[in-house]
């Protein structure tokens, strides 16, 4: 079955650029932060593989795709040549990719991304995991962090400035984050803590990914056995 990872890649990059603070995209600080996220997600995926936790594995695989797509995009001008082609299972990916990530090996980024996509193909074809449905669910959840202006006004029924303030107040009242600032960017609302300079925080409309229900509705083979 042909995958559609290019579509998901482009969605990830759109989301990543929306969530990145103005002027930070492509900076040394931003690139290093993304590499750290790749490393962190790889460790979590490897741990889930050891524990044979299927939901955590699929979640980790989707998260690895999200952060790997971002680092590939950030180094796009530096990467050339074709990726190494070989048959890759999920355990093989976790092992073979470790040194590429640890060493920040930009010349092997295409290979890293190719191996990841092949591992995702593998769990779909051999473990009967609906990986694309799971990836869509993760992306849907990410999208829900950024309500549209229409959603904002429907919720708070006020002008944009007051509605953004009301939404920011809701976040502060329902989380540990303080000094939340909401801004409009490309038709979406982006909320950040620490006076607007911190991480993106989740508004009232955020919905976490429900991978468990997707997996329970399919007769998949337990991951970690191949």
Image: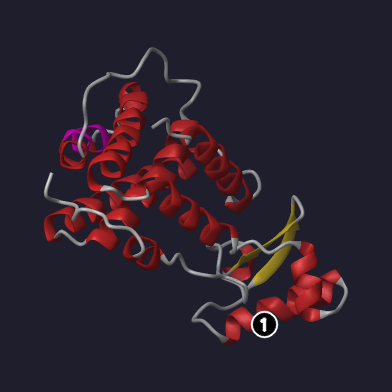
67 relative position to 41: left or right: right
Query: Residue tagged by mark 1?
Result: 169
As for residue 84 lying within the magenta part, the answer is no
User: Is residue 99 depicted above or below 61 in this figure?
Assistant: above
Q: Disc 1 on helix, strand or loop?
A: helix
Is residue 27 at all visible to an observer of this figure?
no
Q: Residue placed at 39% from the left, 40% from the top?
A: 68
Q: Residue furthest top?
A: 81
Question: Measured from the top left, where is residue 153 in percent x and y?
Answer: 81, 72
Q: Residue 152 vs residue 201: left or right? A: right
Front residue (pair 5, 101)? 5
From the viewer's perspective, tell me whether residue 8 is left or right of residue 109: right
Which residue does the image show at 49% across and 51% down from the upper left? 136
Q: Between 56 and 23, which is closer to the camera in this rendering?
A: 56
- Image mark count: 1
Residue at the limit of the structure toward the bottom, as seen here: 173
Q: Which SS does the magenta portion mostly show? A: helix
Q: Residue at x 50, y 38 (%)?
A: 9
What is the magenta range? Answer: 96-101
Residue 27 location (% of width, % of height): 53, 38
Residue at image location 46% in from the left, 56% down from the top? 138
Quadrant in which the N terminus is drawn:
top left
Q: Which sits in the foreground, 148 or 220?
A: 220
Q: Position of residue 180 (x, y in %)?
A: 63, 73
Using the rendered image of the protein, determine whether residue 76 is visible from the camera's viewpoint.
yes
**Residue 99 covered by magenta stretch:** yes
Q: Classify residue 206 by image quadrant.
A: bottom right
- Compared to residue 196, the image places residue 9 above or below, namely above
Expressed as whole percent of the image width and height from the top left, the position of residue 30 reads 49, 44
Please tell me how crowded label 1 is: few (under 14), some (14-19), or many (20+) other residues with Cα within 10 Å: some
> Quadrant of the rendered structure where residue 100 is?
top left
């Amino acid at each position: 079955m042909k995958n559609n990872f290019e579509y998901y890649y482009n969605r990830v990059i759109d989301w990543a650029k929306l969530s990145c603070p103005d002027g930070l995209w492509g900076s040394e600080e931003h690139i290093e932060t993304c590499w750290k996220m790749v490393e962190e997600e790889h460790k979590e995926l490897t741990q889930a593989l050891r524990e044979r936790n299927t939901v955590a594995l699929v979640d980790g695989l989707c998260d690895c795709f999200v952060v790997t797509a971002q680092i590939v995009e950030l180094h796009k001008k530096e990467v050339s040549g074709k990726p190494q082609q070989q048959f890759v299972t999920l355990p093989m990916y976790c092992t073979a990719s470790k040194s590429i990530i640890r060493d920040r090996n930009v010349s092997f980024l295409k290979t890293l991304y190719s191996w990841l996509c092949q591992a995702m193909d593998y769990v779909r074809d051999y473990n009967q995991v609906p990986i694309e449905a799971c990836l869509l669910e993760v992306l849907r959840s990410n999208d829900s962090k950024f309500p549209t202006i229409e959603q904002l006004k429907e919720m708070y029924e006020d002008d944009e400035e007051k509605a953004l303030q009301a939404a920011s107040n809701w976040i502060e009242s329902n989380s540990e984050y303080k000094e939340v600032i909401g801004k409009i960017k490309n038709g979406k609302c982006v909320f950040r803590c620490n006076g607007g300079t911190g991480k993106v925080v989740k508004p009232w409309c955020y919905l976490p990914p429900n991978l468990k229900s997707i997996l329970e509705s399919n007769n998949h083979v337990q991951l970690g056995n191949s």
